Amino acid sequence: MGRAFQNRKESIAKTSDQKSKIYSKYGREIYVLAKQGGSDPEGNLSLRSILDRAKKDQVPSHVIEKALKKAEGGGGENFDRARYEGFGPGNCTVIVDCLTDNPNRTFGDVRQAFTKTKTKIGTQGSVAHMFDHSAIFSFKGDDEEAALEALMMADVDVSDIECEDGIINVFCPQQDFFKAKQALKDAFEGIEFDTEEIQFIPHATLSLEGDDAELFDKFLNMLNDLDDVQRVYHNVV
């Protein structure tokens, strides 16, 4: 079926500075989720999910522990979620998810990334309708039918499932994330997920060349360098 989605290969960052930024982003999200829903991952499924992903991306244990202890201590910063949408280089579509303690600063920083690459930030909803907000699971296997049966028995509304080169990819509504994950764990003993997260998946993809491709790389680098930016979704392949 060839549904395109973007895996964040953050664990292979080339420099210690890049790794520090990634660890900081994880630390902030762990802190926010623990503060909102408690620091016990058994009772906070969202926290458990981000902890699993952090460990998979080799985030040091001291970064995780520091964020959890900070949340347990109360007080501290208050972060709000912010989402910005727009059209990037080559008229690609972009969604930027942030955690911020200063929305005015964050909006200005994100807008500057658009402005300096001669593109335009849009209004809320301007490009989100061109994406599906989906839970995605990828894991090694070739029994697509067994995976589909397990998910259907768990009453998961599977949007799409595909098997290619020994990897099964499952797509389902984001609200079914935990139900789908448990169904797959029950069906496949010892399963290890290559991807287990909620992403925005573009309905159609776009290839960029020449100046547009260079501007797009600059654009992404500017966004990823911002401390408040957690994730960037786009339709460029």
Image (tube, rainbow, N blue to C red):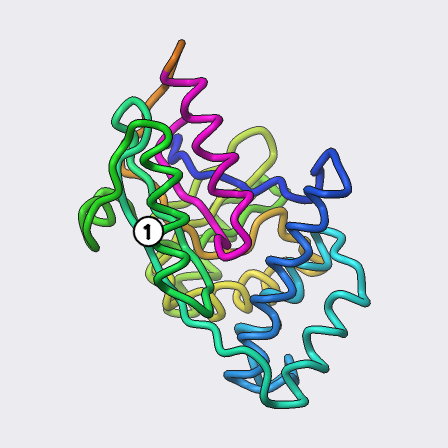
Region rendered in magenta: 212-237
Residue 113, above or below 216 = below
Q: Between 103 and 13, which is closer to the camera in this rendering?
A: 103
On whether residue 232 falls in the magenta region, the answer is yes
Instruction: Inspect this view and state whether residue 8 appears.
Output: yes
Residue 43 shown left or right of residue 89 in the figure: right
Point out residue 54 in the picture as x, y percentages from the top left corner.
Answer: 67, 59
**Residue at the spot x=37%, y=64% of the render?**
103
**Residue at the spot x=75%, y=74% of the render?**
66
Point out residue 7 in the picture as x, y percentages from the top left corner.
Answer: 53, 41
Residue 28 shown left or right of residue 234 in the figure: right
Residue 1, above or below 33 = above
Point out residue 153 in the picture as x, y percentages from the top left corner.
Answer: 42, 67
Residue 57, above or below 61 = above
**Residue at the spot x=54%, y=75% of the render?**
33
Q: Between 159 and 74, which is closer to the camera in this rendering?
A: 74
Quarter that holds the C terminus: top left
Instruction: Inspect this view and state whether residue 45 appears.
Output: no
Residue 173, above or below 226 = below
Three-letter amino acid code of the residue under disc 1? Ser
Q: Between 132 and 108, which is closer to the camera in this rendering?
A: 108
Q: Residues within 10 Å of mark 1 (few under 14, many from 20)?
A: few
**Residue at the spot x=53%, y=43% of the render?**
224
Secondary-structure class at tag 1: loop
Total count of labels: 1
Tell me the quarter of the picture where residue 124 sits.
bottom left
Disc 1 designates what residue?
Answer: 159
Q: Between 188 and 98, which is closer to the camera in this rendering?
A: 98
Residue 149 shown left or right of residue 202 in the figure: right
On whether residue 146 falls in the magenta region, the answer is no
Point out residue 43 in the picture as x, y percentages from the top left corner.
Answer: 59, 86
Quarter that holds the N terminus: top left
